[in-house]
Image: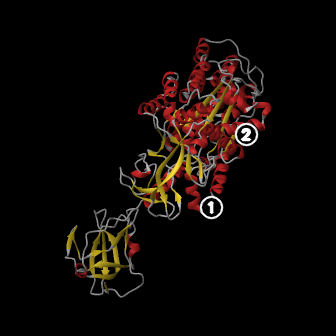
C-alpha cells in the first residue's frame, strides 16, 4: 500500500527519573534517525513524543521524597524534554499525560468503549493495607522473591533476578506504604477482554506482518499461542485519570490503558497549535493512507502490538500500526542498566560532561545498537570509536580536503579537470550509496545504514592518501584541482548521508562547505558543489577524547558499584545460641598499639606490639589490606583476647587476637573503646 504520510511515535518515558543511554539506544536515536531521513526526502511526517506521568513508580518516588506526584512529574518532564532537545531528538511535539487535552481524550476513549460494552467487570481478591486503608498496586507490595529468595522484591518483578511476579507469589509480603502485613479484600475493576480479539490479532500479526523484527514477531506469537486473557484497565489509586463512570470512586485508568492514548492526545495538541502545517489530528490517526510506526523497547512489545491495537480496534475508527521496530537491551560495562542501582549513563549528565559532543554518543549508540541482541556500552569503546573513526577517518578526511583547498585555491572549489581511471573507480565505489542507505533505513537497519555513511568518509580518506595532492602541487596543479574537487564532492555527500545520524556535525560541515541548500536526491552526485564556490571557515569536525575524561567516567561507575555494594549489605545470620558461661571464658582486654608493621612476604598480616598493662605482647592480625599504612595505627587503643593460646605464624609468635568488624564493603575495621581507658582493663 502507498501511504501519504507517516506518523512516528516513541515510547513515553516515565517522568520519575532522567533518560539514560539504554532509552536512547533502544528507542529515541533510531526513531530520530528515521524521522530525519523521511524529512530529508521531503515526505510528510509527524514525530510524536511525551512523558508518561501516571503510574505507581511516580507515586513511590513522591512518597519517598515527601513531595506530591505532580512535583515529581513537573521536575522530570522538564529535565527529559530539555535533554532530548539538547541532544537533537527532533520531536514535532513532546507533551505529557497530565495535560488537560490528554485527560479528556483518555476519559472519552474509555467512555466510548464502556458505552459499546467492550469491557467486562470482574471482582477479585487483591491485597489491601488495613493500616493505610488502601488497595495496594503491585509495586506497593514487597517481600521475598520465591525464585532467588532475595528480600525487597516487588509485586510485579524481582529486581535482583529479573523474574516477573504476581503479588500473591511473594513470600512474607509487606505494604511498601506502612510496612504492615496486607490482607486480601474484594475489589471490582474493568477489563479489556483480549481473548475476544485473539482471532483477528493472530491473522493481523502472524499472517500480515511477517516482516516485523523477529523479536517482535516472536514475542507476539508466544503470547498468542499461550492464549490471551482479559487485562485490567483500571486501578485502585489516587494518582491518575479518574475512571469516568458511576461507582468508580477511588479508581483511575490503569497506566497501560492511559499512556498509549497519549500518542493521540499529543497529536491533537500539536494539530491545534499548528493547524496550517499538520491539519486535523484525525487525518493522522483515522485516515488509512497514514502509516503508523511505534519505536519501542522490547519490554513494551506486547502493549504496542497486542493491547493498544485491541483498544484501537474496539473503538473502531483508528488505524493500526504498520510496524513496531523494537530493539533489545543495552548493557553498561557488562552489567544490566538499572535505574534503582544508578547503574547508567544519564543523558543530562553526559551533556554536562561532554558539551558539543552529542553526535559522538549518537554515533556510538547507533554503531553498537542492540538491534538483534543485547549489546554492551563501554567507555573505552566510546573513546576508541571517537578517536579512531570519527576523528581519524571522517574528521581527518574533511579537514585535509578543506585545508588543502584553502592553501592551494584560496578557499574556493577548484574546477574538475580530466578524470583518471582511479578517479572513476573511486566515484563508482559510492555511486550506489543512496540506494544502500535507503534500503537499510527503510528496513530499520540503522547500524548498517550508518556504516554506509561512514564508508563514504573511508573512501574519501583513502582517495586523498592514495593521490597525495600535496606532492603533486609541485608539478601538476591541474591534477591537484581535480583531486580536491572530487574530495570536496565526497565531503558534501557525507554531509548529506550523515544528516539523519549526526545532525550537529553535518550542519557544521555544510557551513564549512557553504552548502546553503541540500537534498537527499543529491546523494551520490559528484557535482554538488559548483566550481569557484567560496568555502566557509575551516574547523575541526571532531576532537579527540583523552584518557583523563574516560578515567573520570570509569571512576564514577566504580564509585557507584561500591555504593551499591554498601546499599545491598545485609547483616550475617545470628550464630547458634551460646551462654554467658561461654562468654566469660574469653578474657577481652584493652591495649595500646606501640608498634605496627607489615609481616615480610605476607600480604594480609600486620604485626602489632601491644601495651597490655602487663609487660606487653605481640599479636598478628590479618588486616593488612584494610590498613595499607600500618604506622598510622600507632597510639590507637584496641580490644584483644588475652587468653588465646600462642600461635606461630611466619616464624612469629602471636599472643592473642585483635577485634575487628567486617564492614559492608568487606574491609576490616578495628574495634576501639569509646573513650580512653587504662591499658589492660577487662571488657565484660
Query: Which one is in front, 623 or 158?
Result: 158
Indicate the position of residue 400 as horizontal and vertical percent values.
64, 30
Query: Mark 2 packing: few (<14 Cα in 10 Å), some, or many (20+)?
Result: some
Q: Which residue is farthest right?
A: 276
Say which residue label 1 marks: 67
The answer to whether residue 302 is above or below residue 168 is above
The residue where tag 2 is placed is: 269
The residues bearing labels 1 and 2 have C-alpha atoms spaced at a distance of 29 Å
Query: Dots 1 and 2: beta carbons under 8 Å?
Result: no
> For this rendering, which residue is in front, 183 or 456?
183
Task: Tell me: 602 left or right of 14.
Answer: left
Q: Residue 342, how many percent across, how many down?
A: 51, 53
Q: Secondary structure at mark 1?
A: loop
Position of the C terminus, as image quadrant, is: bottom left
Apparent side of residue 179 relative to residue 64 in the rendered image (left or right): left
Q: Quadrant of residue 413?
A: top right
Amino acid at each position: 500500500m502507498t501511504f501519504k504520510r507517516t506518523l512516528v511515535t516513541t515510547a513515553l518515558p516515565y517522568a520519575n527519573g532522567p533518560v539514560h543511554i539504554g532509552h536512547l539506544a533502544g528507542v529515541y536515536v533510531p526513531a530520530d534517525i528515521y524521522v530525519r531521513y523521511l524529512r530529508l526526502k521531503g515526505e510528510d511526517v509527524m514525530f510524536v513524543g511525551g512523558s508518561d506521568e501516571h503510574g505507581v513508580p511516580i507515586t513511590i518516588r513522591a512518597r519517598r521524597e515527601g513531595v506530591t506526584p505532580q512535583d515529581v512529574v513537573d521536575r522530570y518532564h522538564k529535565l527529559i524534554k530539555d535533554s532530548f532537545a539538547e541532544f537533537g531528538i527532533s520531536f514535532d511535539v513532546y507533551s505529557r499525560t497530565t495535560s488537560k487535552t490528554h485527560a479528556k481524550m483518555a476519559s472519552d476513549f474509555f467512555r466510548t468503549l464502556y458505552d459499546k460494552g467492550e469491557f467486562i467487570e470482574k471482582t477479585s481478591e487483591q491485597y489491601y493495607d488495613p493500616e493505610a486503608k488502601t488497595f495496594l498496586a503491585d509495586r506497593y507490595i514487597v517481600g521475598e522473591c520465591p525464585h532467588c529468595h532475595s528480600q525487597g522484591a516487588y509485586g510485579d518483578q524481582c529486581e535482583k533476578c529479573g523474574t516477573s511476579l504476581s503479588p500473591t507469589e511473594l513470600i512474607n509480603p509487606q505494604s511498601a506504604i506502612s510496612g504492615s502485613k496486607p490482607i486480601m479484600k474484594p475489589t471490582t475493576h474493568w477489563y479489556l477482554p483480549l481473548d475476544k480479539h485473539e482471532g483477528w490479532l493472530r491473522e493481523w500479526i502472524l499472517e500480515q506482518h511477517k516482516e516485523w523484527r523477529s523479536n517482535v514477531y516472536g514475542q507476539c506469537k508466544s503470547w498468542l499461542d499461550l492464549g490471551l486473557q482479559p487485562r485490567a484497565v483500571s486501578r485502585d489509586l489516587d494518582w491518575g485519570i479518574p475512571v469516568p463512570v458511576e461507582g468508580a470512586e477511588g479508581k483511575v485508568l490503569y497506566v497501560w490503558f492511559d499512556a498509549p492514548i497519549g500518542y493521540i492526545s499529543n497529536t491533537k495538541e500539536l494539530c491545534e497549535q499548528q493547524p496550517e502545517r499538520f491539519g486535523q489530528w484525525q487525518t493522522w490517526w483515522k485516515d488509512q493512507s497514514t502509516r503508523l510506526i511505534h519505536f519501542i523497547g522490547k519490554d513494551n512489545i506486547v502493549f504496542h502490538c497486542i493491547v493498544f491495537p485491541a483498544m484501537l480496534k474496539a473503538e473502531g475508527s483508528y488505524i493500526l500500526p504498520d510496524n513496531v521496530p523494537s530493539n533489545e537491551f543495552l548493557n553498561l560495562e557488562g552489567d544490566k542498566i538499572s535505574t534503582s542501582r544508578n547503574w547508567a549513563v544519564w543523558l543530562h549528565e553526559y551533556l554536562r560532561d561532554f558539551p558539543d559532543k552529542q553526535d559522538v554518543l549518537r554515533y556510538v549508540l547507533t554503531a553498537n545498537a542492540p538491534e538483534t541482541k543485547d549489546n554492551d556500552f563501554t567507555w573505552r569503546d566510546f573513546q576508541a570509536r571517537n578517536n579512531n573513526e570519527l576523528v581519524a577517518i571522517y574528521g581527518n578526511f574533511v579537514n585535509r580536503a578543506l585545508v588543502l583547498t584553502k592553501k592551494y585555491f584560496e578557499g574556493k572549489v577548484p574546477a574538475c579537470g580530466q578524470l583518471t581511471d582511479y578517479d572513476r573507480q573511486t566515484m563508482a565505489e559510492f555511486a550506489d550509496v543512496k540506494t544502500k542507505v535507503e534500503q537499510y533505513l527503510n528496513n530499520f537497519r540503522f547500524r548498517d545504514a550508518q556504516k554506509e555513511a561512514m564508508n563514504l568518509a573511508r573512501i574519501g580518506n583513502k582517495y586523498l592518501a592514495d593521490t597525495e595532492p600535496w606532492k603533486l602541487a609541485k608539478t601538476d596543479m591541474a591534477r591537484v584541482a581535480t583531486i580536491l574537487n572530487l574530495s570536496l564532492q565526497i565531503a558534501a555527500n557525507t554531509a548529506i548521508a550523515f544528516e539523519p545520524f549526526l545532525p550537529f556535525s553535518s550542519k557544521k560541515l555544510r557551513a564549512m562547505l557553504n552548502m546553503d541548500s541540500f537534498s537527499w536526491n543529491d546523494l551520490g552526485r559528484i557535482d554538488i558543489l559548483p566550481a569557484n564556490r567560496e568555502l566557509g571557515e575551516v574547523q575541526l569536525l571532531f576532537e579527540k577524547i583523552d584518557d583523563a575524561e574516560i578515567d573520570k567516567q570509569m571512576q564514577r561507575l566504580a564509585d557507584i558499584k561500591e555504593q551499591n555494594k554498601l546499599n545491598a549489605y545485609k547483616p550475617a545470620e545470628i550464630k547458634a545460641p551460646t551462654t554467658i558461661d561461654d562468654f566469660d571464658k574469653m578474657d577481652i582486654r584493652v591495649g595500646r598499639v606501640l608498634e605496627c608493621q607489615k609481616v615480610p612476604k605476607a600480604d594480609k598480616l600486620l604485626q602489632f606490639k601491644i601495651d597490655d598493662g602487663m609487660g606487653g605482647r605481640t599479636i598478628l592480625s590479618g588486616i593488612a589490606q584494610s590498613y595499607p599504612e600500618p604506622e598510622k595505627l600507632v597510639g590507637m587503643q584496641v580490644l584483644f583476647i588475652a587468653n588465646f593460646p600462642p600461635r606461630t605464624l611466619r616464624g612469629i609468635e602471636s599472643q592473642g587476637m585483635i577485634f575487628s568488624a567486617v564492614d559492608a564493603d568487606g574491609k576490616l575495621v578495628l574495634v576501639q573503646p569509646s573513650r580512653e581507658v587504662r591499658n589492660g582493663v577487662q571488657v565484660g
